Structure formats: C-alpha cells, structure tokens
Image (cartoon, rainbow, N blue to C red):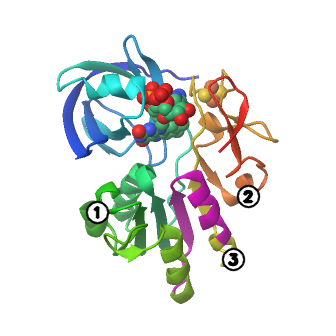
Amino acid sequence: MKCDRQTLPIAAIREENPSLRTFTFSGELKAQPGQFIMLTIFSQGEKPFSILDVDENSFSMTIKNIGPFTDRLFNMGVGDLVSVRGPYGRSYTRQPGKILMVGGGYATPPLRFLAKKLREDGVKRLVNINGARSAEDLLYVEDFEILCHQSHIATDDGSLGQKGTSVDVMESILGNESFDQIYISGPEKMMKAAVIVAKKHQLPYEVNLERYMKCGVGICGSCVMDPTGLILCMEGPILDGETLDGLDDFGVSHRGKTGRIEAL
Ligand SMILES: Cc1cc2nc3c(=O)[nH]c(=O)nc-3n(C[C@H](O)[C@H](O)[C@H](O)COP(=O)(O)OP(=O)(O)OC[C@H]3O[C@@H](n4cnc5c(N)ncnc54)[C@H](O)[C@@H]3O)c2cc1C
Ligand code: FES
C-alpha cells in the first residue's frame, strides 16, 4: 500500500458559484482522470475528492461546501496548509476513437480532466454533454467548448442550452451518431439512466461512482459494494459496464457513515 502524503499550501482559490470553489494546491501529483485524493484538514479529519486538473507543479479540485469539513476548508485562504495523500483508485481507460462524455451536476471535474488528457492523446472525436439544474450550476462551460470538438449543454429549467437532462441530450445525439466509448459522471440516478441508454445502443461505457470512503486504500470496508464485495476505493471509482452489471446497489442504495445500507 502506498501513502504518498504531502503537506501543501493552498496556491489559489476560485469561486465557481456561492457554494462551489476550485482549490489549487502547490505540489506534484501524478494522477490520471477519475482518480481521487484524500485531503486532510488538521482537526477536521480526511475526505476524498476527485482531481480536476494536474499541472507540472500544482493540481486542483472543485469542492462543494456541504458540511463541517468543507466549511472549514472554505474558511481557509491562500497559503494555508492542508495535507494530501494519493492519488488513489482506478482511472478512466482513455480509449482512442470517437468519445462521448456525459456529465451531470457537480460531478463533472473528472470529465474536465479527462477531456484535457484525451485531447493530448489526439482523440479522433470528443463530444461532451454538460448538464445541471440551471445555468449557474454549470461548471467549466468554456473549458469544455475549448477542449471538445462539440460541447452540448442541458439545464433542467432551460436557463441555458437544451431544456432537460444530459441523458435526454445523450438520447438525441446517439440517434444520429455512434461512438466507440462513453464516459459518464454525475449523480447516481442520472448515471443509471445514462447506462440504460448506452446499453440500448450497445456501446461500451464507464461510470464514476461515489461511496462513503474513510481510508481510500482498501482497509476499512466502508466503500464495499454488494453483492460482490467490490472495494470501490481500489477497484473504482471508475467502473466499466461488465463490473457494474454485477452490483445490485448501483442507483439503489449505499453504505452510510456507520456502514448501514441506506436507500439513495
Ligand atoms: C471518490 C470520491 C470523490 C469525491 N469528489 C468530490 C469532489 O470532487 N468535490 C466534492 O465537493 N465532493 C467530492 N466528494 C464528496 C466528499 O468527499 C464529501 O462528500 C464531502 O467532503 C463532505 O464533507 P463535509 O464534512 O463537508 O460534509 P458532511 O456533513 O460530513 O457530509 C455531507 C455529505 O457528504 C457525504 N460524505 C461525507 N464524508 C464522506 C466521505 N468520506 N466519503 C463519501 N461521502 C462522504 C455524507 O454522507 C453526506 O451526504 C467525493 C467523494 C468520493 C467518495
Ligand atoms: S474507503 Fe476504506 S476500504 Fe474503501
């Protein structure tokens, strides 16, 4: 087991919207799209976060202020120290050919990182769907426009792009064009709907799952999925269709803080 822990300063903070900020840390991280790090804030413990981007001497994450841990982070400033270990987990596979990315809500950071890497790989065609409740909840709109050959927007309230979900847009795109691979990241119910569409079109796909994670390295069992006992922090968070088919709790339930199974 590796534990590449580093104590690092916050190098920059960018406000995406009132509850969402992108934190950049000075330091080296050799990570691939879909992997996550464990972030420690002294006196607040440790939480997992997806990697948004990695540069030579810095990396970043977009974080929602949702509870005590993230609230403490939102009260920190540039120069304050945090501790990071990782990266952990399985990344997206980065296939060549024609790629469709389907994103929903605040789960799009790994897709933003993936888009950058796929363009560096020289991917043949990259189409992105960025979905959110409304225009102010959309992330990285300009980045996806620059990085992708085509970028679509869907909002539940129709305030920007097509009115509806990213899965609605996915359905209409796949009615006209086929792809070699689909990469999905979003709320679990949205991913479940996207998987049904991918299966209908018999296209390979990968999803990005979140479960309660305490250790991130396969020790505590908090992220275990039923009935196979898959350890998501090590065997995921990115899962392919075949693996996902063996999991009863995808889109249905998860283990909470105490390990008890709860409905999603
Ligand atoms: C692989 C992975 C990647 C993630 N990436 C991001 C990200 O890029 N940006 C982001 O904002 N959040 C991300 N999260 C969620 C994040 O780790 C926590 O939800 C968040 O830090 C909550 O912390 P809190 O103390 O502020 O809130 P709390 O009040 O403790 O929790 C708020 C909610 O978050 C859930 N949660 C709390 N701790 C964890 C944990 N250790 N693991 C999973 N869920 C937890 C709780 O069940 C609750 O629903 C990710 C989670 C996982 C598993
Ligand atoms: S988070 Fe501990 S085993 Fe996965």
Residue 163 coordinates in the image, percent (x, y):
41, 75
Label 1 near label 3: C-beta < 8 Å? Answer: no
Q: Residue at x 72, y 52 (%)?
A: 243
Q: Residue at x 48, y 76 (%)?
A: 169
Dot 1 corresponds to which residue? 141
Dot 2 corresponds to which residue? 242
Toward the viewer: 1 or 235?
A: 235
Give the residue type that dot 1 points to. Answer: Val
- State whether residue 61 is above or below residue 114: above
- State whether residue 175 is above or below residue 63: below
Residue 110 visible in the shown view: no
Residue 25 coordinates in the image, percent (x, y):
26, 31
Dot 3 corresponds to which residue? 200
Where does the magenta region start and end? 177-196
Q: Secondary structure at mark 3?
A: helix
Q: Is residue 137 left or right of residue 194?
A: left
Give the residue type that dot 3 points to. Answer: Lys
Give the residue type that dot 2 points to. Answer: Glu
Residue 91 coordinates in the image, percent (x, y):
52, 47
Q: Residue at x 58, y 43 (%)?
A: 237
For the residues labelled 3 and 1, the Cα–Cα distance comes to: 28 Å
* Numbered circles on residues, count: 3
Location of residue 152 (image quadrant): bottom left
Toward the viewer: 219 or 117?
A: 219
Q: Is residue 64 left or right of residue 190?
A: left
The reply to whether the magenta stretch includes residue 202 is no
